[in-house]
Amino acid sequence: RSHYAHQKISMVDVRDVAAVAAALLLDAEVTAAGGKRVFDVTGPDAFTMSQVAAEMSQVWGRDVTCEALELQEALQELVSKGVMPLPAATSLGNFLTCVGQECDFIETECVSQIGDKAPTRLSEFLKDYAHAFDSE
């Protein structure tokens, strides 16, 4: 269930973020600058949640679907399930309304150039972490 069932978003593997962060922490030029630079770390592709569900189905060999929700319905669900309190959900809703307008996905070379590794593809992530999503 997702508000982003049909809107593409970029997902980045935490291992890719860690590779970039570690390289930057060891970079004397970056640390000398006092950490005042911004680095856009992106995944290699943008997906809708419906596409993610289809990829999960293919990689895991079981049916996974994504139900589209209106923003307010998604936020109410987060609150009712105890994921976040109402003030946080309200702030999240305001943020998602701002960024939810047509945003173009821009792939950066940050992971490959700074992290010195190929960015992790969704299918690779799903294979590596299948155990974490196992419902049994």
Image (tube, grey):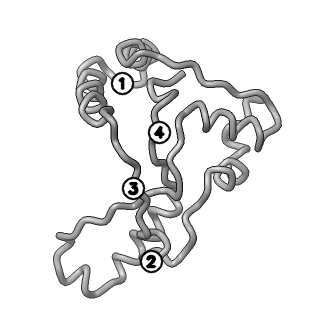
Q: How far is mark 4 from mark 3, CA to CA?
A: 11 Å
Would you say the residues marked 4 and 3 are in contact, meaning their CB atoms lie under 8 Å apart? no
Disc 2 marks which amino acid?
Gln
Q: Toward which corner of the image does residue 119 lie, by quadrant?
A: bottom right
Secondary element at tag 1: loop
Q: Which comes before the other along the chain, label 4 or label 3? A: 4
Tag 3 residue: 106
Separation of residues labelled 1 and 3 (CA atoms): 30 Å
Residue at horizontal 27 percent and vertical 27 percent from the top: 97
Amino acid found under the numbered disc labelled 3 = Ile
Q: Secondary structure at mark 4?
A: loop
Front position among marks 4 and 2? 4
Under circle 2, the secondary element is helix
Residue with the mark numbered 4:
8
- Taking the spot 45% from the left edge, 42% from the top edge, the residue there is 9
Q: Nearer the viewer, residue 92 or 119?
A: 119
Residue 113 — which label? 2
